Image: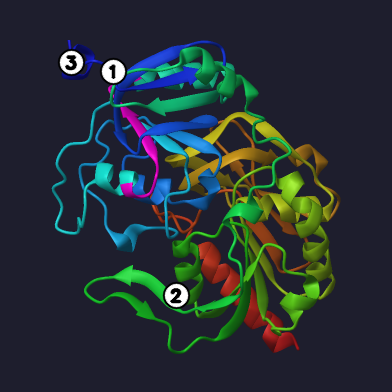
Amino acid sequence: MSLAQTRKPTACLVLADGTIFYGQGFGATGDTVAELCFNTAMSGYQEIMTDPSYAGQIVTFTFPHIGNVGVNPEDDETADPVAAGMVVKWMPTQSSNWRAVTQLSEWLSARGRIAIGGIDTRRLTRAIRQQGAPHVALSHSPDGVFDIDALLEKARGFSGLTGLDLARDVTCTQSYRWDEMRWAWPQGYAPQTAPRFKVVAIDYGAKRNILRCLASAGCDVTVMPASATVEDVMAQSPDGVFLSNGPGDPAATGVYAVPTIKGILERNIPVFGICLGHQMLALALGARTVKMNHGHHGANHPVKETETGKVEITSMNHGFAVDSQTLPKGVLETHVSLFDGSNCGIRMANRPVFSVQHHPEASPGPQDSFYLFERFAESMEKASEAR
């Protein structure tokens, strides 16, 4: 019997179907309600927790060693954790890494995020795969007293992510410039001092490392809020437009974002989208999106590029997908998941417009797909030469 099993529980996870998991709480105290997903990445828990795409979700980490390298400000993908909470198998140990600035539990506590350890994450992951991403309530109470009926009511009352526009909650409030490039030894994050292209990045919940990859590809990046209009974007005279990742239902965010994307497409300039940006580009082109059973969350997802047959191992984080059967004429499917055959990329047949579902910037994960940023830069260079 593990030490966690012999202690009095100080946290519990209540699923809407009535299943209850007891464990040890860490981080902040209190209750939170969200959709539960699992992530199979073996590294990058800090990047995952600060990824804006996880808004409205609690993350179950299937890898047991969570917290062992601590936390540092360089690895944040946004200013604070966005995921509602975390579920782990083993309680975090004392961190052991030269880059650590603080401990995971202290970091979560200071930022109001609840976590639970000592959970059978294998059993929980199987339940998510079989039943779909459940609605849950997570409670951390140091005295071990829980109002299970109230928590169950909260879990059952959660509206879910379908129809929910969360991009408004995580986007920037005003435009700003970005010139920081990818981390490199020994200087860390160096600035881009000789950009070749002017890019507007529409922020639906952009990760910092995506912006760094754009800068490293030679881009002078202006980040604009999700609500930006086509007039706002074109006032910057961009060489290209980037559509970022983000949380929630793409159809809900698309109510105001799709008209902007359509207007940008009419300007005949290069467009590149990732994750939510990919889904909303597909909507703007006439396709539809669907809610997945449990989504794709991890850093080991094989994706096949249909035109070359090349297989890339990718980082993924999405609970919605583009329905490839609804892609209109002139829009080609470029990538597919080798896990389930779902769509992972599109491009317009005769235009420099493309997007992918996976995350070529990784953080965490492999960098097999970084070439997509270079492809975006090449498309802007060709468009410039053609003018």
- Please report whichever mark, 3 or 2, sits nearer to the chain's N-terminal start: 3
Circles 2 and 1 in contact, beta carbons < 8 Å: no
> What SS does tag 3 mark?
loop
Q: CA distance from mark 2 to mark 1?
A: 47 Å
- Quick one: label 3, few (<14), some, or many (20+) residues within 10 Å? few
Q: Is residue 113 magenta?
A: yes
Q: CA distance from mark 1 to mark 3?
A: 13 Å
Q: Kindly identify the residue that appears in the image at 30 percent across and 49 percent down.
A: 107
The circle drawn on residue 216 is 2
Q: Is 54 left, or right, of 289 in this rendering? A: left
In the displayed structure, 7 sits above or below 301; it is above
Please provide percent x and percent y for residue 27: 31, 39
The circle drawn on residue 2 is 3
Residue bearing the label numbered 1: 9
The mark lying in front, picked from 1 and 3, is: 1
Instruction: Look at the image and tell me whether residue 132 can be seen.
Output: no
> What SS does tag 2 mark?
helix
Q: Kindly identify the residue that appears in the image at 64 percent across and 31 percent down.
A: 160
Please provide percent x and percent y for residue 236: 69, 83
Q: Which residues are magenta?
A: 110-120
Looking at the image, which is closer to me, 193 or 119?
A: 119
Instruction: Look at the image and tell me whether residue 216 can be seen.
Output: yes
In the displayed structure, 140 sits above or below 245; it is above
In the displayed structure, 371 sits above or below 118; it is below
- Please report whichever mark, 1 or 3, sits nearer to the chain's N-terminal start: 3
- Which amino acid, by three-letter code, is at mark 2? Ser
